[in-house]
Image (cartoon, rainbow, N blue to C red):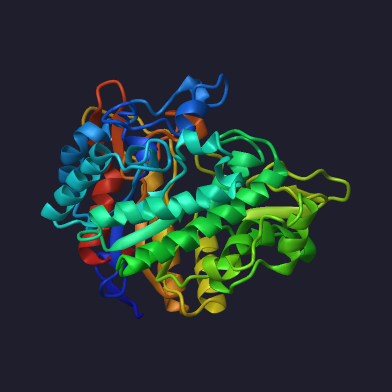
Amino acid sequence: MTTRTDTGASGRTLAFPPGFVWGAATAAYQIEGATGDDGRGPSIWDVFSTRPGAVAGGHTGEVACDHYRRYAADVALMAGLGLPAYRFSIAWPRVQPDGSGPVNPRGLDFYDRLVDELLAHGIDPYATLYHWDLPQALEERGGWADRNTALRFADYASAVHERLGDRVTAWTTLNEPWVAAFLGYASGLHAPGRRDPAAAFRAAHHLLLAHGLGTSALRAGGAPQICLTLNLSPVMGTDADAVRLVDGLVNRQFLDPVLTGALPSDVRAIVERHGGLGHIVDGDDAAIAEPIDLLGVNYYNPTYVAAVPGAPADPAHPGSEGIAFLPARGVTTEMGWPIEPTGLTALLTRLSRDHPRVPLVVTENGAAFPDEPDGDRVADADRMAYLSGHLSAAHAAIEAGADLRGYFVWSLLDNFEWAEGYRRRFGIVYVDYASQRRIVKDSALWFRDVIRRNGVRD
């Protein structure tokens, strides 16, 4: 892929390659609401968010952005912003309320309507099958710590593709399995709220197995483009051993089984210390390594570590004894995450160097800031600066040889931000949750111009 840089009176434009895919992303539980409508069953987030203290403000996704009812207006809004592509997730509990067995046709009817509306507006649908909303019934049978959940996911993938595969060509199996496994089963900060390191490592393996089995199911149905989306973070520090260990837990634990066919030996030793390897069955490595067409990269910030002898393991990183996770440096977003666009350049170039046969797409990148409307305007200059910096970093990665095919901003709408509830706003469109009024932020208009010229002003 090639890029170019145009310099004119209005400044320098970093142009992206022809055919570069621009879009915005969302997730079902974060925007849909309607959690009890049309036969949808409860998810682990429906249950977890009612737990006292689990979610800021006691918020839930019961209403969220009411996208389930307002999807047509939201798609028209996307079209007005010139979005060529939209990445959304499908709620497993809408499709199979019990997590297995018969499909709920009314649940799939919604995604039928959404896909048709997108295509009618010239927007390519990018569907993600799992963005953390596991059916509660499966969690009660062991959740991701149980092998059966991976098998049920393959059935679910087949059912969804059978209904939508004639119109949806771009499929992602899972979003951020590290978060689902280690925030859900180790630290307990996310649903289902368990604190069991051994269960977390089993969950990580079964999520990857679900991805592999789901990929095979999609491929058997004729899906032409299949992706896995990982939250990846460059690990930095002065102690090489600490950096490598955390890179193994955060990045290589998921990259290597999918792209090289085996769990790294250093990570395997950590897993073995936390409950053994009995959950890994002969044939799993081959199933997990089923070839993919794209690797989705969710990037927000680097991870800084230091060796501190005697330090206990971080709850979200079992096996990290003797290592400290350092606080953010410099300017941060409202989430407390450091703003470091160069980390994206480093990550993309590393991935293309280590795995040159796998094209990349940035499936999430964005920032939370304390947006306040002023009448019909939300002036979010901080977000524009954030996105501009990260798009410039992506362009630099392409120039350095990274095979980057697209970029999806997180997120289209302000939404339910998991354990943070509604107090953090990532959207390029403001949502007044009381009235459900949408206000296009300055960043959305800026992003519209980036799409129009297929480039960002440096």
In front here: 263 or 440?
263
Image quadrant where residue 427 sits: top left
Q: Nearer the viewer, residue 235 or 132?
A: 132
Left or right placement of residue 323 versus residue 351 in this view: right
Could one spot residue 272 in this view of the protein? yes
Residue positioned 55% across, 33% down in the render: 140
Residue drawn at 47 percent across, 61 percent down: 213
Q: Residue furthest front?
A: 101
- All told, the count of numbered labels is 0
- Give above or below for 391 relative to 445: below
In this rendering, the answer to whether 172 lies above or below 27 is below
Q: Position of residue 244 (x, y in %)?
A: 72, 64
Up-down relation of residue 368 to residue 302 (above or below): above
Quick check: 406 left or right of 258? left
Q: Position of residue 78 (x, y in %)?
A: 20, 48
**In the displayed structure image, the side of residue 9 where residue 137 appears, left or right:** right
The residue at 20%/40% (across/down) is 74
Residue 148, image x and y in percent? 54, 49
Q: Is residue 79 visible?
A: no
The quarter in which the C terminus is drawn is bottom left
Task: Report the quarter where the N terminus lies.
Answer: bottom left
- Residue 205 lies, in percent from the top left, at 61, 56
Residue sitting farthest toward the right: 310
